[in-house]
Image (spheres, helix red, strand yellow):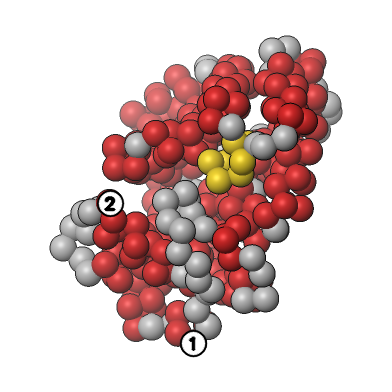
Amino acid sequence: MNWESYVLHVKWFTDRMTEPLPMVEVLTPAFLFWLAITIVGLLVSAVFNTHILRVGLIQGLDRSLSGLKPYTVHILRVGLGIGILLQLIEGSYLAPEFHSETSWLFIVLVIALLGLMLKRTLFVSGVALLVLYIKATLEYGLFHTLDYLFYLGIIYYLIMYTTRFRETAIPVLYALTGLSLAWVGIEKVTMPILAYDIIQEFQVPTFGFSVEHFVIISAFIELGLAWTFIVGILNRFVSIVVTLVFITTTTVFGYTEIVGHTIVHTLLIMFIIQGGGAFKSPFEFHRSPLLRYLFIVINFGVLLFGMMWIYIAMGST
């Protein structure tokens, strides 16, 4: 494996080459402690999910934001357009570390940008982004481009927007954005040394925690928030939290962070407005509260350890 291609959003800021730790080295007492805390947090979120939605203030906010739902596609068009324009200026595509060194990549980016101008040509942008995603996967490897699964959600949204499958676009976008966030969280627990370098180089405050604990905490925050996106718990609240986190990191990491996260910010604004999708979320499939809570805990474990196994296997070949 060419590890020079796997400098990992951490990737955007370090050139260190490393491989994921074996599972046995990941499962430290600190890891298990923060896993337990995360599970408790997810259960609390699940318990209060319905109750919070019944609060008068929240219901009023929900009605106000629901009135903006027809404009989410316009928000995506504008935010995605700004993100693509920044990539054109920087000579990159999809992400800061994917370099656009050939003219045809520039042309595809321009096509993706122009396709956003009209609703009926959104599928053109979707196809153009799919071409870029495939190109990045072939050049940098699937292990790398899995960081950016949210692009597949955007591609699906753009292609399906003018079809009868339009209502499926938001749930797919939620799920793939959540998986993308989870994959980045897995990176931190399996290759923590990359994050250690960033914290030291940029003097990131750890709020009294050791660097090792701070990285694990950051990873589990990402994993927990990712799981709420996937199963549909407190979607608006989680979107606001992630947005505030990204704004904070922008003040530390600067312009590269803006280029890399402009499109993600756009998705989060969409989620804040959208709330849930037109279909039941996975969390709502079970009527029994007990089954819902078991679903949250068991499947979070499946997500965590399943993705960790895949990450270590892919990263060690």
Image x and y of residue 10, in percent: 44, 55
**Mark 1 Cα shell of 10 Å, populated few (<14), some (14-19), many (≥20):** few
The N terminus is located in which quarter? bottom right
Image x and y of residue 74, in percent: 60, 17
Mark identifier at residue 202: 2
Q: Please tell me which residue is depicted at 45% across the width and 84% down the height of the picture.
A: 25
In the displayed image of the protein, which residue is found farthest to the left? Answer: 208
Q: Is residue 237 above or below residue 3?
A: above
Rendered image quadrant of residue 188: bottom left
Q: Is residue 112 visible?
A: no
Question: Amino acid under label 1?
Answer: Val
On the image, numbered disc 1 is attached to which residue? 24
Please state which of residues 76 and 201 is positioned toward the viewer in this rendering.
201
User: Could you give the CA–CA distance between mark 2 and mark 1, rounded to whole angstroms?
Assistant: 30 Å
Question: Amino acid under label 2?
Answer: Phe
Q: Is residue 115 above or below residue 282?
A: above
Please state which of residues 98 and 242 is positioned toward the viewer in this rendering.
98
